[in-house]
Image (tube, rainbow, N blue to C red):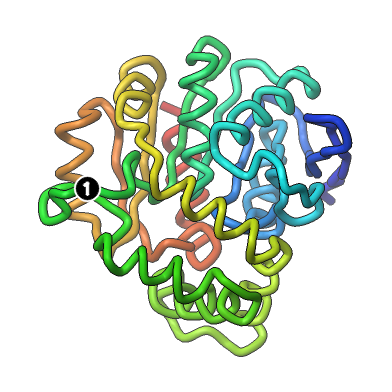
Amino acid sequence: MTVIKGTYIEVDPAVELFIQEAGDGDPIVFIPGFTFTTEVFQEQLRHFSKTHRTIVVDPRSHGKSTMTLHGNDYVTHGTDLAKVLEALDVRNATLVGWSFGCLTVWEYIRQFGTDHIKSLVLVDMPPKSLSLQQDQDWVEGPLDDLAGAYNAYLRNPQGQREFISAYAKGVMVQRELTEEELNWIVEQSMQTPYYIAANLFASGLFSDYREEAKLASESVPTLTIVAEHWAETATSYLQKLAPKTAVQVLGGHFMFWEHSQRFNELVEEFLST
């Protein structure tokens, strides 16, 4: 039976991050995406803790971590990650970022390099969200659509619920969700207040980590797992930007939840090479 330990780490005065940890061995650290929590990685926590020291992080203003008006951007999140790894005495870890969690990983690399990273798994996130060449580059979506989402949805709690609900049904999961599943997904996001979600959304969309993505792929073994709906564009883009990155294709944006067994197999295969 997996014994999961929950703890809090102070990363700034009066700002604590909630951490879950289980298992022994080489460390693997999971960082969730925009407004999501440690709960989304429970299948990975159970699976990988059989062979690895497995750590899952609630970023600041996510889940059980402190809700704060300060530092709700991915520059701060990268610094927070470094403080967590130092506090837990984690060295030579595999970092697994999902969605905007990849931005946290790349920001960590921008600030601290790759010396203490063993390998990277980057789940379904372009290193630059917006581009004027959106017909050629791998981007989050058309600029007007993303601006519309920001202005229409992230202005109040109802809008945030509607945004995450539509995203869950249209992009995250390929099958039809039950009402209970959809409510659970929305509840994970709603632990982050809408006004903080808006800050994170803007910070993520205006980030540019192309140099870090290229550097990382040349410095440490890197696996990128992309969703099927943009696999051709993403694969072509990564072959040009970071050709040493291994690329796998699986499911929708939430593939590690919907297709957890296959996702875990892909990561295991990557770690064993």
* Coordinates of residue 41 in the picture (x, y in percent): 64, 54
Along the line of sight, the residue nearer the viewer: 183 or 16: 16
The residue under the point 57% across, 14% down is 116
Look at the picture and state if 196 lies above or below 106: below
Along the line of sight, the residue nearer the viewer: 81 or 115: 81
Which amino acid does the dot numbered 1 rest on?
Ser
- Location of residue 236 by image quarter: top left
The residue under the point 68% across, 44% down is 59
- On the image, numbered disc 1 is attached to which residue? 131
* Coordinates of residue 249 in the picture (x, y in percent): 31, 53
Look at the picture and state if 132 lies above or below 22: below
Look at the picture and state if 148 lies above or below 222: below
The residue under the point 43% across, 40% down is 122
Along the line of sight, the residue nearer the viewer: 229 or 193: 193
Task: Describe residue 102's horizontal placement relative to residue 66 as left or right.
Answer: left
Which residue is the extreme one toward the top? 115
Task: Describe residue 165's horizontal placement relative to residue 89 as left or right.
Answer: left
- Location of residue 228 by image quarter: bottom left
The residue under the point 11% across, 50% down is 136
Packing grade of label 1 (10 A; few <14, some 14-19, many >=20) is: some
Q: What element carries label 1?
A: loop
